[in-house]
Amino acid sequence: MYHAWFAAQDDPNERYPLTEVVYYSRSGGLLEVQHDMAALAQRSPEEWKRLFDERWMRTTWPYGSGVWGKKEWVCPIVDNDNVVSMFEGGTNLFWAERFGREIGLEDLWIKMCGNSHTGSFKDLGMTVLVSVVKQMISEGKPIRAIACASTGDTSAALAAYGAAAGIPTIVFLPKGKVSIAQLVQPVAHGALVLALDTDFDGCMRIVREITANPDNGIYLANSLNSLRIEGQKTVGIEIVQQFDWEVPDWIIIPGGNLGNTFALGKGLLMMYELGLINRLPRIVTAQAANANPLYRSYLTGFREYQPIKAQPTAASAIQIGDPVSINRAISILRRFNGIVEQATEQELADAAARADRTGAYACPHTGVALAALIKLVQRGEIKRSDRVVVISTAHGLKFSRFKVEYHEGTLRDVIGQYRNPPIELPPDIDAVRREIDRRFG
Amino acid sequence: MYHAWFAAQDDPNERYPLTEVVYYSRSGGLLEVQHDMAALAQRSPEEWKRLFDERWMRTTWPYGSGVWGKKEWVCPIVDNDNVVSMFEGGTNLFWAERFGREIGLEDLWIKMCGNSHTGSFKDLGMTVLVSVVKQMISEGKPIRAIACASTGDTSAALAAYGAAAGIPTIVFLPKGKVSIAQLVQPVAHGALVLALDTDFDGCMRIVREITANPDNGIYLANSLNSLRIEGQKTVGIEIVQQFDWEVPDWIIIPGGNLGNTFALGKGLLMMYELGLINRLPRIVTAQAANANPLYRSYLTGFREYQPIKAQPTAASAIQIGDPVSINRAISILRRFNGIVEQATEQELADAAARADRTGAYACPHTGVALAALIKLVQRGEIKRSDRVVVISTAHGLKFSRFKVEYHEGTLRDVIGQYRNPPIELPPDIDAVRREIDRRFG
């Protein structure tokens, strides 16, 4: 009854099944997943809300997953038996009461997407991509492995979902640029990790070449594959659901390749079109100042856009100078009356540290979003009583080194204002009592 | 209507309110939380199940938490406004289909308790303890801070919950024995971290002394405080709930200080007593061979028990030679027809690596439990069709170093049979194709 397909961005009539091995339109552009909205509109908004609430985190396979609980909206063409799920979504919407009070907000929330199987929001999208591949294999398509070029969360999620499904995975990386420590998730999950004697662009060339010929039987999982967007878009739907279907005023999201900004908007627009919500939040995309091509474009009213060479940033997953999803992210930001803000290394590190001190455990990308928030509150764009959600994209446990260096005082370009190093004392009760009195009065 | 209190283990008539600052009975034994079971029995089993299902992961504060959704059974005396919660529990019950098949089981599940705010099961108990302290403060008790001596998950959870609540926390550690890297969670969460020039026992002495005198206003969070058990006990209830109230045949749990074995049994017995289940699973406590006092006692039919000096193990959180909860854990194991099994460093590391290759991401303690499982299946104690749940106590992300060393081949006392180091290749499509063919055929 429900149906979805790939469509060319520049020609919606150019269509492909979601189980076809195809990544580009005839003109070389990205493909996008489109849904049969007329079929979806046959159910009333109230019926959809009730269905989504009934399934929420419960036990009927695969609908307990936050992604697959919205299966009809995400990927209706996969048989339930082919779903590869690790109970994605349903992550805590953390009430950042103390952080909000510190910066002058009454109603601040942090969506803890990193509280997940592989520790980042990438699980939301990867469950969809790997499930579609399992569906293809069940239909007899000769797929031997799924591949990506990634040094971070994408390869971790791909390898984990592949391992759970029994589908081989391949991760391409530049030799010598990454350590086993950075790669430990794909290594542990049994991916074939190929360290090539070239740079990251060289790896991308090889992975595109090896996946371009369907005879090789290697399927591409990099972010130009739009299946992942369908899972990622549930984050916005889920936030609204967690507010009992009330729309917050602002959603702030870190942006690098910008697929996540697009996905957030896509999910919210689907809710709007199907009548589950009657207004849209404003979206803020937050970039590291060292990797800010979208921010620079925003300053021109999105009239101009220039790729840049991204500089190193602690927010390594968004250190991207030429985002794949630049155009579709800009269209989302226009539609959502969006803002783009940036954060320096100092600002993002201090913001993450303040969040940690008030109970969150922020990755540096979340630090970028929180630093952007602080600026918008200070400028008065975000009002004291506005309901604001910051999307935290990864678990802080993935960034122990960043936190260690911050508190040691060795983090590049940062003088930590919220450092909290251990205090050394003799094993003496009076010395301990004095130190406690000094700190807490 | 519902009520709970501390009772002395050796004299149930010796009672204290849960909001009293008291850790020991008059005879110096542990205190335990008792509930007014007669009041709880006024609701039928079916009503309890319906109530718990209605609240499960939903939005009404604080009942969406897996712990606070069972508030009447856990800690009825806390006002909802004083609950300090980060949406504990509700973690994925991962169907370990591939791992099970490899070892000859059809119905194997891993309860991913580490998929949580601070990355370990300790959140389940700490939310209760910190909430009770917030309740005490709201009632005017002069508490300035909460303290513990811990190098690991307990200090992380205490500091995070304290940070969220705005209640100061203190962590005591031996100077020089732990790095900022090990401490990064309490450091980041703003705990006062005191590094004392003594060993761990010396730290315990100081923390007991500073918390013993109520005038100091420092509340003790170490595991002899039984409030934490009340939250931890929900793990067993939650597992049964996730099977639509069916009891699995076996639950396997790693054991060090053994509070968790006791808590697991306590929750299941409460369900049994109140009629929600009509049989009990068998419980297996799994110990590292390097820290196995319970295993040694089990070999004597629990007739003898000797503390030992625990040797180093990768499963660092259970490297304990004289467990605080030895007696109450043994009574649980007797009641549940329990088994104790052990795992060497080699066995625990290989078991964790096999789990990772099939989609889990196992901490070394989970490796201990999985290695014990393998032995019990090989011995025929656990049958092919039995439904088995392994409790995973922490997120693998907390143990990157363990995994890196395993795959580098540098882990102490271990020759990893499932190592998966990266393959170095020239950036050449034919070389890549050959390697892929070699691996996947």
Image (spheres, coloured by chain):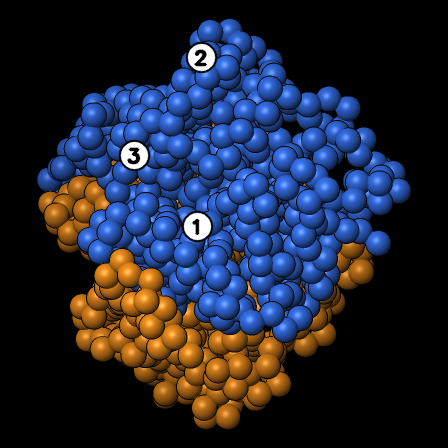
Chain colours: A orange, B blue
Give the class, few, some or many, for how many residues have Cα within 10 Å of label 2's Cα (few <14, many ≥20). some
**Chain that bears disc 3:** B
**Chain that bears disc 2:** B
Label 1 vs 3, first from the N-terminus: 1
Label 2 vs 3, first from the N-terminus: 2
Q: Are marks 1 and 2 on the same chain?
A: yes
The residue that disc 1 covers is B154
Q: Nearer the viewer, mark 2 or mark 3?
A: 2
**Chain that bears disc 1:** B
The residue that disc 2 covers is B299
Q: Is residue A27 left or right of residue B332?
A: left
Residue A76 position, x and y percent, is 63, 44
Give the spatial CA distance, label 2 vs label 3: 24 Å
Residue B155 position, x and y percent, is 41, 54
Label 2 secondary element: helix
In the drawing, what numbered circle is on residue B314?
3
Q: Is residue B106 left or right of residue A39?
A: left
Q: Marks 3 and 2: in contact by CB < 8 Å?
A: no
Give the spatial CA distance, label 1 vs label 2: 30 Å
Whether residue A64 is situated above or below residue A314 in the rendered picture:
above
Give the quarter of the image for residue B438.
top left
